[in-house]
C-alpha cells in the first residue's frame, strides 16, 4: 500500500479575482481536500462567519502569534494582517491528507519559501476591466480603496511566474474543474510516488 503524504495546494491571485467564491464552490462538491482557514485582523464583512471564512483576531493577538512563530505565513495587506496557522497545516499533511489554502499573493510567496514542494495555483481575471468591476460591485470599499486594490493587483499579476499553474476565472464552474484536475494530476506525478513504489518492489523481492 502506498503511504502518501498530503499535498499542500495554494490558491492565490489579485484582490477581487474571486478566490473566495471559487474556493467555496470547490468545497461544495465532494472533495478530500482539507481547507485551512486563514486568520485576519480585517473587520468581518456582511455574511461572513468566524471559523468559516476566517479566524478574526485583534492586531495585538495576531502580532503575538507572529512573535511565537505560530503562523506558516502572514502578510500585511491594505492595512490588515492575514496569515495561516502553522500547526493545523503541518499535522494534516503528515496524516496523509491534502491541505488547501486560499491566501493573498504576499502570503503565497512566503509559503513557497517554507513549503517549496507545495502546488501553487494563480487565479487570473479574464481582464483588468472585469477585475475592476468585481471590486466595485462588492460595494464594500471606497473609491480610493478600489484604486489601491487595482494598483496592488497589477503588481501581484507580475508575480505570476512564481506559480506552478494559472487558472482563468471566467466561469466559476470551469475554474473549479481545472483546480480538481490539478489536484488529481499532482497525485499521479512520478516524483511524488516513485520512491514508495521502488520500496514496494524491493520488499517484494526480499
Image: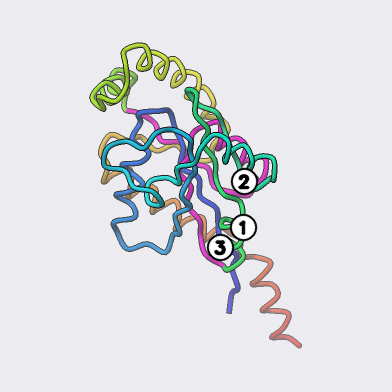
Q: Residue at x 32, y 36 (%)?
A: 45
Contact check, label 2 and label 1, Cβ < 8 Å: yes
Mark 1 secondary-structure assignment: helix
Earlier residue among tags 2 and 1: 2
Q: On the rendered structure, is 116 left or right of 7?
A: right
Contact check, label 3 and label 1, Cβ < 8 Å: yes
Instruction: Tell me the number on the disc at residue 92.
Output: 3
Quadrant containing the C terminus in the rendered view: bottom right
Disc 3 crowd, CA 10 A, few/some/many (<14, 14-19, 20+) = some
Look at mark 1 in the image and give the residue it sits on. Answer: 90
The image's colour scheme reads rainbow
Disc 1 crowd, CA 10 A, few/some/many (<14, 14-19, 20+) = some
Q: Residue furthest right?
A: 206
Residue 112 belongs to the span the image colors magenta: yes
Note whether 149 is above or below 101 in the view shown: above
Residue 22 appears at what percent x and percent y?
Answer: 33, 43
Q: On the rendered structure, is 139 left or right of 145?
A: left
Out of 176 and 75, give the one closest to the viewer.
75
Q: On the rendered structure, is 176 left or right of 187?
A: left
Earlier residue among tags 3 and 2: 2
Q: Residue at x 46, y 49 (%)?
A: 37
> Marks 3 and 1, Cα distance to the nearest angstrom?
6 Å
Q: Residue at x 73, y 86 (%)?
A: 205
> Marks 3 and 2, Cα distance to the nearest angstrom?
13 Å
Residue 65 belongs to the span the image colors magenta: no
Note whether 109 is above or below 180 in the view shown: above
| Span of residues in magenta | 96-125
Amino acid at each position: 500500500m502506498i503511504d502518501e503524504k498530503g499535498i499542500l495546494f495554494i490558491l492565490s491571485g489579485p484582490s477581487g479575482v474571486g478566490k473566495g467564491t471559487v474556493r467555496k464552490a470547490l468545497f461544495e462538491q465532494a472533495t478530500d481536500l482539507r481547507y485551512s482557514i486563514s486568520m485576519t485582523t480585517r473587520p468581518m464583512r456582511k455574511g461572513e462567519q468566524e471559523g468559516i471564512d476566517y479566524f478574526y483576531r485583534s492586531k495585538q493577538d495576531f502580532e503575538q502569534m507572529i512573535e511565537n512563530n505560530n503562523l506558516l505565513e502572514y502578510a500585511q495587506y491594505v492595512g490588515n494582517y492575514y496569515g495561516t496557522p502553522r500547526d493545523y497545516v503541518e499535522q494534516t499533511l503528515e496524516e496523509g491528507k491534502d491541505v488547501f489554502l486560499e491566501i493573498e499573493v504576499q502570503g503565497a510567496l512566503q509559503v513557497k519559501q517554507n513549503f517549496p514542494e507545495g502546488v501553487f495555483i494563480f487565479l487570473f481575471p479574464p481582464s483588468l476591466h472585469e477585475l475592476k468591476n468585481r471590486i466595485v460591485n462588492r460595494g464594500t470599499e471606497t473609491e480610493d480603496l478600489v484604486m489601491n486594490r487595482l494598483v496592488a493587483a497589477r503588481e501581484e499579476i507580475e508575480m505570476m511566474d512564481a506559480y506552478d499553474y494559472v487558472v482563468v476565472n471566467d466561469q466559476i464552474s470551469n475554474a473549479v474543474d481545472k483546480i480538481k484536475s490539478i489536484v488529481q494530476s499532482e497525485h499521479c506525478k512520478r516524483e511524488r510516488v516513485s520512491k514508495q513504489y521502488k520500496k514496494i518492489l524491493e520488499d517484494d523481492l526480499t
